[in-house]
Amino acid sequence: MPFGAPFQVRLREAGLAYLLLLPSLVFLAAFTYWPILRSVWFSFHDVVLGDSRIIWLGLENYQRLWDDRLFWKALGNTVFYTVITIPVAIVCALLMAVALDSKLRGMAIYRSAFFYPVMIPSVAAGMVWVFLYSAGYGPINQGLRLIGLPDTAWLYDSSWALPAIMVMSVWKYSGYFMLILLAALKLVPSDLYEAARLDGVSAFDRLIHITLPLISPTLYFVAIIGLLHSYQIFDYVYVMTHGGPADATNVLTFYIYQNGFQYQDIGYASTLANVLLLFVGGLIAVMATVFGRRVHYLGR
Amino acid sequence: MADVVLQGVSKAYAGRPTVHAVDLTVADKEFMVLVGPSGCGKSTTLRMIAGLEDITSGRLLIDGADVTHAQPQKRDIAMVFQSYALYPHMTAYRNMAFGLLKTTRLGKVEVDRRIREAAEILHISHLLERRPNELSGGERQRVAIGRALVRQPKVFLFDEPLSNLDAKLRSRMRGELKRLHSELGLTVIYVTHDQIEAMTLGSRVAILSEGRLQQVGAPMELYMRPANTFVATFIGTPEMSLLRCAVKPEGEGSLVQHERFSATLPMRAGHADAFLGVRPEEVRVSRPGEGLTRGIVERTELIGAEALAEILIGTDRVVARMPVPEAPDSGAEVSVFFDLARARLFDAATGRALPAA
């Protein structure tokens, strides 16, 4: 909008802009911001699903959360899941993307092959992995038997259940991250690599000193997206283990679901949800300050 | 420093040939310019010398060693790219140091000494801590050249290095490059599509068209004695005019018969359908009634110190160059003279210069 335009013209254009924004603002308000405010309000009350009485509790729910060993376990599981799954998935995705960023024949086929897991609905994927992991007839155990290793009931063993879900998540996320990173790799001018090749810079040094710095904005973006996804992990846990065995795979979103919809304790579930929101928000703020400044934007 | 020899170097992409058996020798300390219109194969040829493209057939020797299939880093060359290819996340200093530190055993002190020295030569000492986005086009260009200089390679390759600069800066950088070449005694192979750049920079110029080498020679030799009609019309602005004519021997010379005139040329060319080639400065016009033939002025352009007139002679067009006051009006009928002692003949069928031309 030109600054020199008469006030009425500017007002009319601004009015139109706001009018066009209105529908999405209404939806955001109704389905995002209002529920968040409600859940903050719920967290100070005793609210039971199907019961119209609402009793003021003050900070009692937060006190309860502080003393709730299961909350800490679920938080621990979630953090463990995130700090392993996301970096591993990003490294896998980067390796796949670098391998696919060549002009060899058949790359389109590999690209779709690696991306395929992303397209499978998570519930269906979960069911498939339940089969893969199952004791006795599961292909993974069959394979292990071939090389003389004992059967493991992966999803029923409290020390293996969470890592099993993490392996499956890496498989599911990598293709998605790979596609985003591949797009970033394509934007790195090829003559930078050519200049480095003429100098005799090794492929490893080219990756570390040229590729990584230049795709750092995308890596940063993928890390944030991964973080958001992993703190919302629910579907795989619900389908594959239901939080078990002995809460070994109970993660925060699943624990929120249990409290809210299995125990009908909306007040406490809201408290958990608010704490999760603050926790993720805090993490992202930390990431933004630690990594955000080191990110190099091409051409800026 | 060293010589570079191309022996029948060819390139084919998916079976389609793009560079045809180029034979070229670049002498030690020579400034060789590869020039031609876009798509002529000059950049591909340069990239084959660099090792960035495979050589489909033929041999490449640098300093006597066969490097036809050697990895780029084994060839001891440095290249300056059209886009400069500076690492955007590194300072000018780091850009120059990176390759040396990663791939040579030179100590930091020696690397630093080389960078300071190159920066001195290129007048960029005060810019070393800046990143490429904080530099102007000309400054980036200097950093890119600096990055090549510090490697102290046998051969410098330049791929259209000036085409991203504005006209004024381009002419200044041309002077700089010429100075660098003579002061430091570099062997340079330089690709450009700009014939002015080729003429002013090259000790010798190699002209390519459609993947074939057309002629190699000193700039003025190409201008005065083009080997074929392509070279004749590619070098020189405005281009050489070609008039269709028949040629036959007459005495010691040749008789040239155009649809509007006949003339005798001092060289023997045999019997042929030919083109008579005349440069704009070899055409003179005067009032009707004199001269070799007559023509109609189609268009006159005043370009400062001089004027160009496009003259229709029969069905052929000829461009004449003259001082502004002598410029004829458009539509005027004029007499035309040619400086026949300097004119050349080309075979109409093959385009090749006819003997003794």
Image (cartoon, coloured by chain):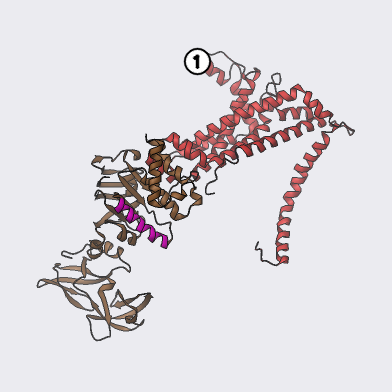
Chain colours: A red, B brown
> What's the magenta region?
B167-183
Coordinates of residue A187 in the picture (x, y in percent) = 50, 45
Name the quadrant of the N terminus of chain A: bottom right
Q: Residues within 10 Å of mark 1 (few under 14, many from 20)?
A: few
Coordinates of residue B146 in the picture (x, y in percent) = 39, 48
Q: Which residue is mark 1?
A: A147
* Prevailing secondary structure class for the magenta stretch in the rendered image: helix
Q: How many marks?
A: 1
Residue at 66% of width from left, 25% of height from top?
A: A240
Q: Is residue B171 magenta?
A: yes
Q: Is residue A37 magenta?
A: no
> Is A174 on the left or on the right of B347, as rendered?
right
Picture quarter containing residue B294?
A: bottom left
Q: Secondary structure at mark 1?
A: loop
Q: Amino acid at mark 1?
A: Ile
Q: Nearer the viewer, residue B158 or B269?
A: B158
Q: Looking at this view, name the residue that lies furthest to the bottom.
A: B289
Q: Nearer the viewer, residue A289 or B240?
A: A289
Decide if residue B259 is in sight here. Answer: no
Q: Compared with residue B93, is residue A223 higher up or lower down, i.e. above or below?
A: above
Mark 1 belongs to chain: A
Q: Compared with residue B331, is residue A258 higher up or lower down, i.e. above or below?
A: above
Coordinates of residue A300 in the picture (x, y in percent) = 54, 49
Decide if residue B213 is in sight here. Answer: yes
Coordinates of residue B91 in the picture (x, y in percent) = 48, 45
Picture quarter containing residue A278?
A: top right
